[in-house]
């Protein structure tokens, strides 16, 4: 007997409720969570056939009652009452677990959206400040050169050969360099203080804006990390909620049938209830398989039809990029009035373009890549983002349904979702975003450069 078998034998001896190691090898093949309940009754019958009459565990695998438990409890009123209470509690716990995990998932989805929008806002602010700084820096150079030209003219008439050589050498590439030289020239300061002061002011303003832009970029980077973590937390919470729902779905039918069998005072046997559960599971599995096959066929047909009919919806360009949906643009990129609905208010800056092909129309991957996120958010509703590599990504919001999952590789033009009205939305449309280093940029010129009009 191995060490593991010895442990099992000791457990069986101590509680009088487990099969021997030999019985385990004969009867218990490896099972997963989905098959455990179905195996419970067969295992009990087989053990009984071997004469192991003492095998009557309080719960089957994972703490759920077996049909043999129900059969045994049904024959004794006190045991039956205890088993009814036990099953009712298990059902309540399953339902509470689903509700709790879904509530967490909803909150994490909301947190993700808020963190993402904060990152977008910070990114926009940093870009705006840097643009202002670049403009002011160019103005500072021009102002410094203008002051230099004035100084040059002054010293031409004044006969200062050194100054002539200094300024006839050409314009300054750096405002700092030229202003430092100009600051030592008394004649310029005496006669053209205003010109020099304007140049210095432009230089100082440019530096201040550059400093502000750097601070904004630092804040943006922190918020991007927070958004990435919030996205992961939302994905993990959604996975946990789905696992709890699967656990409930896999066991609730059986538990409810067991409860009905215990509470039934008619001649209907426990075996009848068990057979009904197995038939219900068979029919559900068949229906799910048929639905999956139909969805796959519909998606394939939609792709084929779009490619054949053209219209710019999923037909590939020479760049490999495709239009993410049909329909006209209903809202462009940029500042706008915040939109409020029952579920909340949108940002006052629209970080994408909206396309309105109609409810349940296909949404296509704009380019090949790996799905970075597929799940719910509070603002975008059903939302998908795709990483295309090289710091480029795309986002798809407000979908009625999602057909791809996180980590999945998709090809350009593949149907990934259906147009919907989820999240903060006032009608069926696709909210389409393009990211550069995961900061949102205007999709219209980006896609136009790749031969796609949105």
Image (tube, helix red, strand yellow):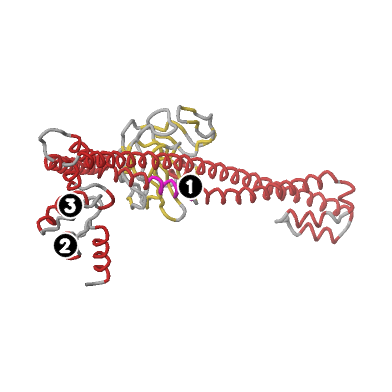
| Residue name at image x 28 percent, y 50 percent | 63
Foreground: 441 or 30? 30
Magenta: main secondary structure equals: helix
Residue 272: % across, % down: 11, 40
Q: Which mark is residue 23?
A: 2
Q: Which residue in the structure is indicated by mark 3?
A: 39
- Describe the element under mark 3 as helix, strand or loop: helix
Is label 1 or label 2 in front?
2
Real-space CA distance between mark 1 and mark 2, rounded to the nearest whole angstrom: 49 Å
Q: CA distance from mark 1 to mark 3?
A: 40 Å
376 relative to 338, above or below? below
The tally of labels here is 3
Q: Position of residue 105 (x, y in %)?
A: 41, 42
Q: Contact (CB < 8 A) between labels 1 and 3?
A: no
Q: Which residue is mark 1?
A: 230
Q: Which residues are magenta?
A: 229-238
Q: Residue at x 11, y 58 (%)?
A: 51
Q: Mark 1 or 2 closer to N-term?
A: 2
Sequence-first disc among 3 and 2: 2
Report the disc number at residue 419.
none
Check disc 3: other Cα within 10 Å, few if <14, some if 14-19, many if 20+: some
Q: Secondary structure at mark 1?
A: helix
Q: Nearer the viewer, mark 3 or mark 2?
A: 2
């Amino acid at each position: 007997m191995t060490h593991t078998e010895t442990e099992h034998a000791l457990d069986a001896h101590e509680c009088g409720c487990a099969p021997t190691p030999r019985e385990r090898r004969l009867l218990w093949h490896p099972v997963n969570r989905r098959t455990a309940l179905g195996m419970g009754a067969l295992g009990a019958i087989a053990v009984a056939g071997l004469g192991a009459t003492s095998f009557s565990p309080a719960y089957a695998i994972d703490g759920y009652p077996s049909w043999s438990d129900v059969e045994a409890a049904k024959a004794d009123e006190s045991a039956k009452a205890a088993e009814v209470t036990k099953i009712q509690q298990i059902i309540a716990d399953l339902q509470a677990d689903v509700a709790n995990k879904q509530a967490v998932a909803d909150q994490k989805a909301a947190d993700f959206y808020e963190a993402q929008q904060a990152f977008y806002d910070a990114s926009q602010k940093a870009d705006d400040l840097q643009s202002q700084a670049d403009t002011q820096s160019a103005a500072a150079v021009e102002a410094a050169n203008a002051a230099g030209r004035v100084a040059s003219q002054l010293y031409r008439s004044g006969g200062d050969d050194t100054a002539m050589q200094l300024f006839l050498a050409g314009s300054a590439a750096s405002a700092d360099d030229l202003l430092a030289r100009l600051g030592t020239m008394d004649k310029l300061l005496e006669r053209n203080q205003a010109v020099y002061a304007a140049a210095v002011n432009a230089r100082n303003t440019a530096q201040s804006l550059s400093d502000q832009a750097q601070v904004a970029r630092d804040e943006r980077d922190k918020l991007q990390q927070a958004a990435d973590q919030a996205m992961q937390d939302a994905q993990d919470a959604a996975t946990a909620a789905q696992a709890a729902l699967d656990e409930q779905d896999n066991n609730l039918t059986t538990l409810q049938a067991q409860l009905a069998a215990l509470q039934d005072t008619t001649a209907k046997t426990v075996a009848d209830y068990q057979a009904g559960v197995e038939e219900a599971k068979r029919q559900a599995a068949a229906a799910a398989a048929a639905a999956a096959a139909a969805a796959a066929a519909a998606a394939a047909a939609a792709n084929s039809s779009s490619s054949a009919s053209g219209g710019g919806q999923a037909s590939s360009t020479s760049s490999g990029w495709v239009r993410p949906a049909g329909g006209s643009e209903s809202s462009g990129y940029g500042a706008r009035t915040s939109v409020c609905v029952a579920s909340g208010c949108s940002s006052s800056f629209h970080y994408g373009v909206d396309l309105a092909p109609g409810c349940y129309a296909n949404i296509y991957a704009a380019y090949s890549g790996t799905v970075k996120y597929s799940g719910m958010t509070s603002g975008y509703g059903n939302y998908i983002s795709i990483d295309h590599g090289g710091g480029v990504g795309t986002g798809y919001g407000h979908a009625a349904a999602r057909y791809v999952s996180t980590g999945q590789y998709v090809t350009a033009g593949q149907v990934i979702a259906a147009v919907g009205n989820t999240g903060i939305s006032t009608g069926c449309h696709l909210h389409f975003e393009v990211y550069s280093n995961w900061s949102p940029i205007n999709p219209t010129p980006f896609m136009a450069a790749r031969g796609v009009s949105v």
